[in-house]
Image (cartoon, coloured by chain):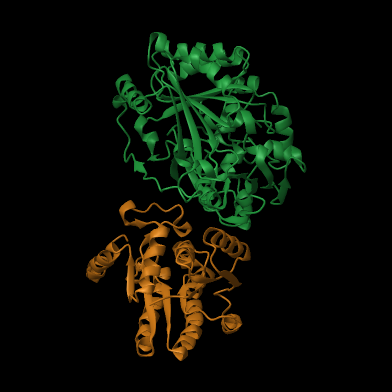
Amino acid sequence: MHINHLLILGANSGIAEAVAYEAADKGIKLTLAGRSEEKLIALKSDLTIKYESEVDYVLFDAFNISLHEAFYDSLPNKPDAVLCAFGILGSQEKAQQDWQETNAVIESNFTGAISILNIIANDFEEKGAGIIAGISSVAGERGRQSNYIYGAAKAGFTAYLSGLRNRMAKSGVHVLTVKPGFVKTKMLEGLETPGPLTAKPEDAGKAILSAMIKKRNTLYYKSIWRLIMYIIKSIPEPIFKKLNL
Amino acid sequence: MQEITNWNLYPKVKAEVKSFTSKNELARLSGMHFDTIRGNGRSYGDASLGAKVIDTTAYNKVLSFDTEKGIITAQSGVLLSDLLEIIVPKGWFLPVTPGTKFITLGGAVASDVHGKNHHKEGAFSNHIEYLTLLDAHGNLVQCSKQSNSEIFKAACGGMGLTGPIVEISLRLKAIETAYIKQKQIKAKNLENLLPLFEENASYTYSVAWIDCLKKGENYGRSILMLGEHATKEEVKSSHKLKVPKSKALSIPFNFPSFTLNNFTIGAFNQLYYSKNISAVKEMVTPYEGFFYPLDNILHWNRIYGKKGFLQYQFVIPKNDGGKGIIKIMKMISNRGMTSFLAVLKTMGPEDTGYLSFPKEGYTLALDFPIRKGLFEFLDELDKVVIELGGRLYLAKDARMSASVFHKTYPNIELFREAAKKTNLSKDFNSDLNKRLSII
């Protein structure tokens, strides 16, 4: 399958930028959507200067759900592929005490993502073509005390993408669930992560775009995370609940 | 907290490091009492070290490139290597480049770097259209040689003590090809080398590599490398502005320091010489090998072992400069303080920056693996450099004393006054500043 025009929602996230560079290198037209105009302009100029590719940008706020319909309607040319890459990690400790923090994690990773993807999925379904990719997380595979609010939101998003894939299968629209492990982006700044399990954003970007083009269903990146999560999911609950994870 | 260090692996400090991708994020960090700003960690000193450090490498976008006029504007964290990939195919080159392309644009300004063309074209600051800085109030200040010139003079070579450099607009140099017409001349010793520099002063690029190990009359045998950007006619390839990708080798771990005895250094130099058999050799070569010979050996710094090394780069004026260079080289040889690389260049008149390193004369750069007695020895060398009217390069320095610094950088008061305009309450206070009391 070929992608002509990719819409990236949350285009300034570390992984999203890496996908954007990879797509620009392949000559794919890009529409960058995000909250910070300054960052979008900088990314657009960098992509345009480096790859002489066609790039535009549009402001988009995942939290502002009432504007999602208008946002999509306003796009002059509709994309044939979308990557939903936004979502904040938040602070687990803070979220336990502070509903605002919890709600922001849920709204960005779950509610906001579903709101905009509902709209895009309906459009793609009507056209009978398109690729939808969502960046979920291995954190959604099993709740752990260190980040279960983020994990719960991502688990919800994973379930959504799985259901959407099932619904779209008959209409020629493909849905990819991306489950990154550690990717060395700003999101992980200050966190020490084990080297062999930590991916470079540019490698993740390549893998994601390639999985979209190849119409894969689920991408673990790095792929070792599929095995790691399989093991983590197999630990019996009576033991799991006592672990310090 | 993480451990950070620069290219020479000394000193190492524990630091809280934060990056940013927009001016707003930078302004927020700047208000949080960070000690210093850090690029790609390719300096040899402590200017980018402190307990709380702002990392610019994620702020790395190219904002505009005028391919007609040759002006490129970018965020401070972009690497020169990224710029080269963009500009060379369009017929442009960096106006000044140091010996590695893996430095950030902001670092190039803050160190006011020089290259093999300083005697002809000055330092980096000589080619800047304008800079923007973030001042202590979180406002952006634009400066250039013409406007807000005190701030400009402080920021260029100011080692980050003027607060963060945000954007840089650079005037590029037009090239016809991505190749260098290179000429190599072998010199038997230092006495022969120095006149060769003078005879070839019209070359845009010149640099000499010196073998510090040979004793007796061959002491200081060297190769002088001269270069000009090759014209279209001089390049046979049909892709004039494209060069073949070179393969990078990586040194994957720190060498144990005992491998770095005189024997291995001798072997290295021998190897280097065997490639250059005839006395004078001319060739047309891709720019990368000419400007960045060591960039193809990634992590070459690890060859010195875990303890790291010190780089010692000084400049001394030309009158007696030749004798001065010979004197210092002899002191090094007599102490058995072998240096792996000795690189000699000539420099033109002083640059704009109050703390810019270059001044008219000879500059010599040496690497010394850290071992017992080295620091004391370098203190002795400092005295000789001061006597000869010279000074040390702050981007290469991790150890000189405050008194040596203050004796050799006469514009310090002007710098302090200007630095107040953007770094009002001395919020930015790097380990370099703590050591040298610059502001």
Which chain wears green? B
Image: B389 above or below B272 = above
Residue A150: x percent and y percent? Answer: 43, 69
The residue sitting at 39% across, 90% down in the picture is A171
Chain A's colour is orange
- Position of residue B439 in the picture relative to residue B4 (left or right): right
Residue B70: x percent and y percent? Answer: 64, 49
Residue A213 visible in the current orientation: yes
Residue B270: x percent and y percent? Answer: 33, 23
Image: B36 above or below A90 = above
- Position of residue B156 in the picture relative to residue A119 (left or right): right
Tell me the quadrant of the picture where the C terminus of chain B can be found: top right
The residue sitting at 23% across, 69% down in the picture is A238
- Position of residue A191 in the picture relative to residue A62 (left or right): left
Q: Nearer the viewer, residue B153 or B176?
A: B176
Q: In which image quadrant can residue A213 be found? A: bottom left
The residue sitting at 64% across, 33% down in the picture is B121
